[in-house]
Amino acid sequence: MTRTYEVRTYGCQMNVHDSERLSGLLESAGYLRAARGSTADVVVFNTCAVRENADNRLYGNLGQLAPVKAATPGMQIAVGGCLAQKDRGEITRRAPWVDVVFGTNNIGSLPVLLERARHNGEAQVEIMESLQVFPSTLPTRRESPYAAWVSISVGCNNTCTFCIVPSLRGTERDRRPGDVLAEIRALVADGVLEVTLLGQNVNSYGVELGDRFAFGKLLRSCGSVDGLERVRFTSPHPKDFTDDVIDAMAETANVMPSLHMPLQSGSDRVLKAMRRSYRRDRYLGIIDRVRAAMPDAAITTDVIVGFPGETEADFADTLEVVRAARFAGAFTFQYSPRPGTPAADLPDQVPKPVVQQRYLRLAALQDEMSLAENEAIVGRPVELLVATGEGRKDAATARRSGRARDNRLVHFAPASVEVRPGDVVSVVITHAAPHHLVADGPLLDVRRTRAGDVWAARTDPSPGVMLGMPNVGAPA
């Protein structure tokens, strides 16, 4: 009898991409994705160790599943990802009903570990200290027919005091450019229009290859892939951001005018305490050079509020940089100690009420800046890649959603012709809000794409057509 699976994902884009690999592995091993609302035979938790209370969230979910498993013969539970890499045997001690624990460096072992746990009747814990097989060589069940993550590196060589990721994912390992491009070409052949190059620090790509200009060269090479319409990347580190990358972005037609570059703090003193090896002037200088090369680029960022020792003057510096940078959007975080990081043991931890108050002030300022940046686009035509499962499609307006070339989210009015996820439409922006744009006028153009054809094939309800058919990419 065919067994079913469910993967529950927490954390960053790297975890989302890893979950696509886990799903592909399980389907290659003969499992089927569980129907919505049903109880899966195998539930996999792909965890994060960065967010606050990540362990409480995991153990709470495991506790809810304990009686379900007890009442379901043969059901298995697996825990992987960063929290599994960090806590190791602690998971099976606190939740002895878990069958498999695996780390960030051995996601390819999951099907074997599940079978071994069934055969031996005991939990299997396997945590590799270093990467054995680059995850992009594994089969993949991609959720989107039109957009795909492409990992160019794993691990990180930085030592930021607030971050535990390097100790969980190891030092940076780079894929060969030819392997990256082979995966991209295979994706485009399957109908994908947009790829996002993924790494903990994408613009240090090439350190293992001995080529400090490798990332800019890779961006230019993406420009020669026929059928690839949009290229994005996340996340770069300001210390490694070089002018050749800016030139490659500006001169390569399918590299999008969007940049997500974490700031973390606008205070030089706090940046030093964070071990972020750049200062505010260097950061703002990069922003200025990007805008000089691409005046319409949308720039987003990450900011941490309340890092240990942050004073009101330090926070004022952050607000000043946010005003100067004119970010299109920002992910803002309230600092909380992470066990195992140097910052957790620093003196002068900022009181929670102070952190919360600063967080609200920063969020209000960023909303003001985002609204101003978005209002400047009202009246302009923009090209959208139509999305699925994103944004609002309320009954009152029947609006659909898509992403502009600069990655802004746009809700647009229904069309008189069929528009499918993966198709491309052109609209005129009629209204702006801090976190989205609206285009309520008629569509200027609709372009049906192979990606839209793939989406339609996946969701075709006619007999003999498999719903949700996986798009398994060829190994790079």
Image (tube, rainbow, N blue to C red):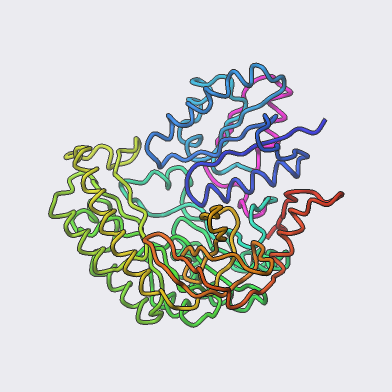
Would residue 26 be counted in the magenta stretch?
no
Residue 411: x and y, percent? 51, 63
Q: Is residue 186 left or right of residue 271?
A: right
The quarter of the rendered structure image containing the C terminus is bottom right
Q: Quadrant of the N terminus?
A: top right
Estimate the x, y position of residue 442 in percent, counting from the top left: 56, 73
Residue in front for this viewpoint, 199 or 422: 422
Q: Residue at x 38, y 73 (%)?
A: 242
373 left or right of 25? left
Q: Is residue 346 above or below residue 429?
A: above
Task: Say left or right for 158 vs 43.
Answer: left
Residue at 72%, 49% (x, y): give it.
468
What span is colored magenta in the figure? Answer: 108-137
Is residue 163 found left or right of 284 in the rendered image?
right
Outermost residue on the front side: it is: 396
Camera-nearest residue between 379 and 134: 379
Q: Is residue 122 magenta?
A: yes
Whether 133 is drawn above or below 268: the answer is above
Res 191 → quadrant: bottom right
Give the answer, above or below, for where 352 lies relative to 117.
Answer: below
- The answer to whether residue 81 is seen in the rendering is yes
Work out whether residue 140 or residue 446 is closer to the camera in this orientation and state it: 446
Residue 327 locus on image (x, y percent): 33, 65
Residue 72, position in %: x, y?
Answer: 69, 20
Q: Residue at x 49, y 82 (%)?
A: 251
Q: Quadrant of residue 364?
A: bottom left
Residue 261 visible? The answer is no
Q: How many marks?
A: 0
